[in-house]
Image (spheres, rainbow, N blue to C red):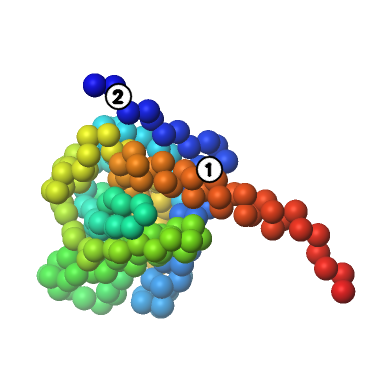
Amino acid sequence: MTAPTPVILTEMELDALTELVNLGVSNAAHSLRELVREEILLSVPKVTVVSREEAIKNLGERDAKRLVAVHQDFEGDIAGRALLIFPETKSLELVRAIVGSDLSLDEIVELEQEALAETGNIILNACLATMANNLGRTLKISLPEVLHGAGREFFYVKPPPFVDDNVLFSFINFSVRQRNITGYIAMLLDLPSLATLKNLLTELIERTSQTAAVPPNDN
């Protein structure tokens, strides 16, 4: 059986994708800022496309074994799974920033799952919606689910993804109430969805170039 031809995004397409994700997390930061009434900064330096095993390896090299993830599935012209991942040791710190420092540790632990789900829902929905809107498409997004584990199981949550899944993998910086919380956004896509994304990014780049090339109207 012939192996499927890999889909490779060009540097320009990756830059365009990184910009879309950055727009998404900027929108998420605004929503979180309204929620906690504090300054929140989110940034995504770069988006890369790697295999699931490479994504798992990246997580293992950068962070402790125990991680927490919020995942949501999405369907449409592009289908896949989006995950927000960060070290479990930072989860209570993130929850404390969201719900306030006046609560006791027991109260924070009790609210942990709900707060993490809401945070992941805000960030992942903002990223997915921003990408879809700018690419001229719509997506149906599932409710968030919180997972705890070593990282590998995050990429093999049932229903199982296709063997040839690719991962859009990006490091994300959180700055919440002067707390530095680092994490990752990962999106699992099969080859047809990645090929569709590549075509949509090409169209976006062409539209942007044409708009930039139009001279301003002096009238």
Q: Nearer the viewer, residue 116 or 95?
A: 116
Q: Quadrant of residue 36?
A: bottom left
Label 1: how many Cα within 10 Å (few below 14, some 14–19, many 20+):
some
**Residue at screen point 46% across, 67% down:** 27
**SS of the residue under disc 2:** loop
Residue 186 seen in this snapshot: no
Query: Of marks 1 and 2, which one's residue comes earlier in the chain?
Result: 2
Q: Residue at x 57, y 41 (%)?
A: 12
Residue 160 at what x, y percent from top left? 16, 44
Please name the amino acid that badge 2 sits on: Ala
Q: Residue furthest front?
A: 1
Q: Residue at x 37, y 54 (%)?
A: 77
Q: Is residue 29 left or right of residue 74?
A: right
User: Mark 2 and mark 1 in contact (Cβ < 8 Å)?
Assistant: no
Q: Provide residue 89's location: percent of width, then percent of height.
A: 23, 52
Residue 127 seen in the figure: yes
* Residue 100 against residue 193 in the figure, above or below: below
Residue under the image location 64 percent in, 54 percent down: 208
User: In the orientation shown, which residue stands out farthest toward the right?
Assistant: 219
Q: In the rendered view, does 98 fall on the left or right side of 134? A: left
Instruction: Name the amino acid, label 1.
Output: Glu
Residue that mark 2 sits on: 3
Residue 104 lies, in percent from the top left, at 17, 73
Q: Badge 1 is on which residue? A: 13
Q: Secondary structure at mark 1?
A: helix
